[in-house]
Amino acid sequence: MTTGLGRCPCESEAEEQGVTRRGFLAGAAALLAGTIASVLGAAGLSYFVSPAFEKEDENWIDVGRASELRTGAPVKVDYVARKRDAWVVTEKRSSVWLSNLGGGRFIAFDPRCTHLGCPYRWDQGKQEFLCPCHAGVFDREGKVLSGPPPRPLDRFPVKVVSGRLLIRPVDEKGAA
Ligand code: FES
């Protein structure tokens, strides 16, 4: 409605309200789009990133209380390694030789001899690891003392978390 004085004040008020409403709707739409993009982005990012962290946690295996491992002699400990591939979980029984060197230092030895992979044992009297297959001999820290083994005993990464001894075994292909 127009009057002799120009535009009706109610029109400009309605226009202002229209702009405000449009602005509000545009802002709300942008906010909604931003929220959806953030949620989808975070979900997509976690899909790619989280397996790396899960894998890290899964590969460390709890082999017991660190305080229960005496410094006197290495101990062979059996454990079950679980591997998850999507929804499939496989279990593999294995063992590790654990040695407490004192002062919070621990060694976790691969239980296979570095010559041809035979299981070796600890001789408490001689204070040596002995491999029965070809008479390989290692000292307490895994160094070769005699026999055909080409290198010291292989070690697994080991750490203490909240008083628990964790190891990360490595398979024949070098994968954790
Ligand atoms: S496998 Fe151990 S010495 Fe040969």
Image (tube, rainbow, N blue to C red):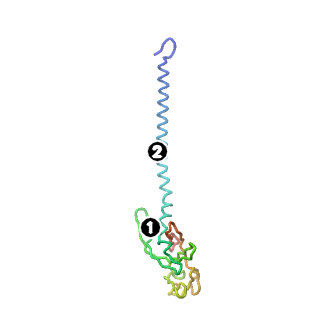
Dot 2: what SS? helix
Task: Give neighbour class at mark 2: few <14, some 14-19, many 20+ (Cα, 10 Å).
Answer: few
Measured from the top left, where is residue 25 in percent x and y?
Answer: 46, 34
The mark total stands at 2
Residue at the farthest top position: 4
Observer-nearest of 67 and 12:
67
Observer-nearest of 25 and 173:
25
Write down the residue under mark 2: 36
Marks 2 and 1, the one that precedes in the sequence: 2
Measured from the top left, where is residue 49 in percent x and y?
Answer: 50, 57
Distance from Cα at disc 2 to Cα at disc 1: 34 Å
- In the image, what residue occupies the spot 47% across and 27% down? 18
| Mark 2 close to ligand 1, CB under 8 Å | no
Tell me the amino acid under the disc marked 2.
Ile
Residue at the farthest left position: 88
Query: Given contact means CB atoms under 8 Å apart, are the residues at marks 2 and 1 in contact?
Result: no
Write down the residue under mark 1: 83
